[in-house]
Image: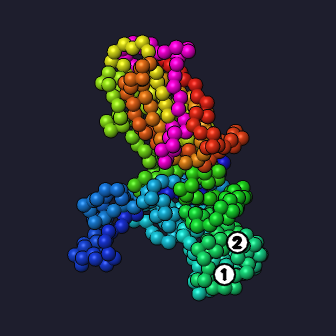
Amino acid sequence: MNSKVIEINNLGKQYRLGQVGTSTLSDDFKRWLYKVRGKEDPFLKVGETNDRTQKGNSEYVWALRDINFSINKGEVVGIIGKNGAGKSTLLKILSRTTSPTTGEYKIKGRVASLLEVGTGFHPDLSGRENVFLNGAIMGMSKTEIKKQFDAIVDFSGVERYIDTPVKRYSSGMYVRLAFAVAAHLEPEILIVDEVLAVGDQEFQDKCLGKMKSVSGEGRTVLFVSHNMAAVKSLCKRCVVMRNGQVTFDGSVSDGISKYLEALNPSLNNGTIEAHHRTINSGNVFIKNIKIENQEFLTGNSIYFNNSISILMEIDFLNDFNDIIIDARINSNDGVELFHSMTLYDNDLIKVSKGVLQTKVNIENKLQPGKYFVSLGVHLSNGATLDYLENVLELNVLNVTNTNSKGLVYDFKLGYGRLNATWQIN
């Protein structure tokens, strides 16, 4: 059984908004008075959730609040969430670059952190000197650093500039050397924030391979990224954060699904806003729409090359004998790539008053990107009973199903090349 190397209990971090040093003398005195009496800081009782989308009234904000989870030795954990969710603040606390306001955390082992470009580097020192400086900070001996030095330089690809002051490095060179140092100086725990986005694709792939190698040696990796492909490829566990709190802790696929669903919450409850109804007769209403596939059960984002299904409940207020249902997928710039209509059992659909459940299964060969789904109900004479234009946003992720063969959609073939089948209940 794996032993815990990181344990976090009721962790919180509070910040005061505005300029540093604007606290009043009366506030400072009140804090001091409570402290000498052994009472809780009175200002910890105030403060708002760190929601950057809304204007608050308090001058205090909780960047983190009530964080509780533990990480076992050898685990590779992805931490994801929108900007401002508290991910970087959490990693800064675990890296000991800032202290928590409330709660506690325990870490067993040597920690190497890469939180931003050039973390721990002195700009006036050369790359070689910074390698030894970082190693010394981590508690390594000169002999241990020398043993890894050639591997660090080779991995970073900056051998020609290793004796040049790092202030003359580009951001890409900076992060190459910084990651090489963090990964090769044999830390028990490796903490990596979104810095890999600075490097080129070749270096990002190289870093992911190195982190996999590090985890295979029984070391622990905490990885923050907005690249869902990298998270899925590297991590075995996912922690989702929102407004300074942990909202999910579990499998990577479920975690990515929760994160992406939160980006488009209107899909979670199937609510159709009035402005989506481009045409409506008043007696037919499409409702409760959702997208399904083998990875995301109820999300508007899918993996590349995964088949998808669009489920609809259609409320008919009258009986109809000649119904046609259709679905369209347009590209982000409005080009129609897919259009399918249903003629159930080679005939028109006959429906009675009530709710009809419909599903269209689509063979997905769309390239990664953003698409929009439109849905409609029509009569055989062409009259439209209900039409929802661009009602759903569909995100095809650059993550291939492990069972796929990597098929790529050819836009030159035009629309209608995606095979589809309909189910009517």
User: How many numbered discs, if any?
Assistant: 2
Q: Which residues are magenta?
A: 329-355
Left or right, 415 with respect to 29, comes to right
Asked if residue 191 is positioned above or below residue 18 in the image, the reply reads above
Residue 418 can be seen in this image: yes
Asked if residue 355 is positioned above or below residue 269 in the image, the reply reads above
Q: Nearer the viewer, residue 411 or 47?
A: 411
Residue 185 can be seen in this image: no
Residue 267, image x, y percentages = 42, 38
Residue 409, image x, y percentages = 64, 42
Which mark is on residue 179? Answer: none
**What amino acid type is highlighted by mark number 2?**
Ser
Q: Residues within 10 Å of mark 1 (few under 14, many from 20)?
A: many
Left or right, 307 with respect to 59, comes to right
Left or right, 203 with respect to 356, comes to right
Indicate which disc, 1 or 2, sits on the residue closer to the N terminus: 1
Q: Look at 58% across and 63% down and name the residue there.
A: 197
Q: Identify the residue under disc 1.
A: 127
**What amino acid type is highlighted by mark number 1?**
Gly
Which mark is on residue 156? Answer: 2
Residue 148, image x, y percentages = 75, 73
Image marks 1 and 2: residues in contact by CB distance under 8 Å: yes
Q: Is residue 151 magenta?
A: no
Q: Look at 65% across and 61% down and name the residue there.
A: 201
Residue 99, image x, y percentages = 45, 69
Looking at this rendering, what residue extends furthest in the bottom direction?
124
| Numbered disc 1: secondary structure | helix
Q: Nearer the viewer, residue 72 or 296?
A: 296
Q: Look at 58% across and 59% down and name the residue there.
A: 222
Looking at this rendering, what residue extends furthest in the left direction?
26
